[in-house]
Image: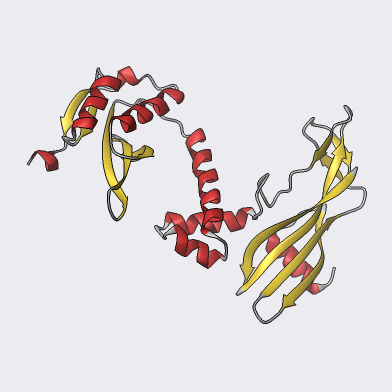
Amino acid sequence: MDNSKEIFSIALGLNLPWQVSSVSFKRNDNTRELHIDLSFERGSQFVSTDGDSYTAYDTVERTWQHLNFFEHKCFIHVSVPRVKQKDGKVVTQQVPWARKGSGFTLLFEAYSMLLIENEMPVKKASSIMGIYPQRLWNIFSFWVSKAHDADDIEELEAVRFDETSSKKGHNYVTTMVDIEQRRVLFASPGKGADNIEESVKYLKEKSIDTECIKQVSIDMFPAFISGCLEHLPKAAITFDKFHVI
């Protein structure tokens, strides 16, 4: 392996059987792009979904956008192996640097999420990452949904419902907060009884016995009051002091 291939192999964190086969730089008046081609060693075996190992049956071409190298966009190109299982089913192998169905590497998505987590607007973050905002929203939605699915809620006894404006005007988002752990459990667009219903439905999907919720804190908005009376009938309602004064 020559020096450039070795450098990029280390930078990408590649392990056998994956290796850098070529590196090229494309330049014109408007773009500067780095293109890295990866390959696998001939005869390599891959563990398939049935738990057995197989050599490649054939390959399919895939491309992922990676984090920039310096100021240059970087793309990874791979002939991804497909294996033929004992049952005759042909399965495309999952690569270690990207999640299934994504056109970006995991490192690209991780850095994108880091920008958003630090309260950077999606439009600005997408400009930094060099992609359209909707593609960044897709990344954001995937990881937030994954976090929601993995979220383990225990011993929930007190919640608070707050509304906040998502942008200028009357565009509200209602959040449900675990008062004891001081963390947001659920958020939904709007401001009304429907938001209480959606929040309670989410808790039930998490196998939470909502009848065990003893305390709910809200402002004096009538729709919140009616929503709590209907969907959290056993919880005592406490009004936010800032709305009482």
Quadrant where the C terminus sits is top left
Q: Is residue 46 left or right of residue 101?
A: right
Identify the residue at horizontal 28%, vertical 31% (top origin).
159
Q: Residue extending furthest right?
A: 43
Q: Nearer the viewer, residue 121 or 226?
A: 226
Identify the image quadrant of the N terminus.
bottom right
Q: In which image quadrant can residue 8 be found? A: bottom right
| 232 in relation to 90, above or below | above
Q: Residue at x 65, y 61 (%)?
A: 66
Q: Going by the picture, which residue comes out furthest to the bottom?
A: 29
Asked where in the image residue 10 lies, by quadrant, the reply is: bottom right
State the image coordinates of residue 102 (x, y, percent, origin top left).
65, 49
Q: Position of residue 125 (x, y in %)?
A: 48, 62
Q: Which residue appears farthest toward the front when viewing the image?
A: 169
Task: Please count the marks in the image.
Answer: 0
- 201 or 54: nearer the eye? 201
- Image coordinates for residue 139, horizontal then vertical, percent: 55, 50
Q: Position of residue 118 (x, y in %)?
A: 41, 58
* Residue 115 to residue 175: above or below: below
Residue drawn at (69%, 61%), measured in percent from left and top? 12
Question: Is residue 243 left or right of 24 when viewed as pictured?
Answer: left
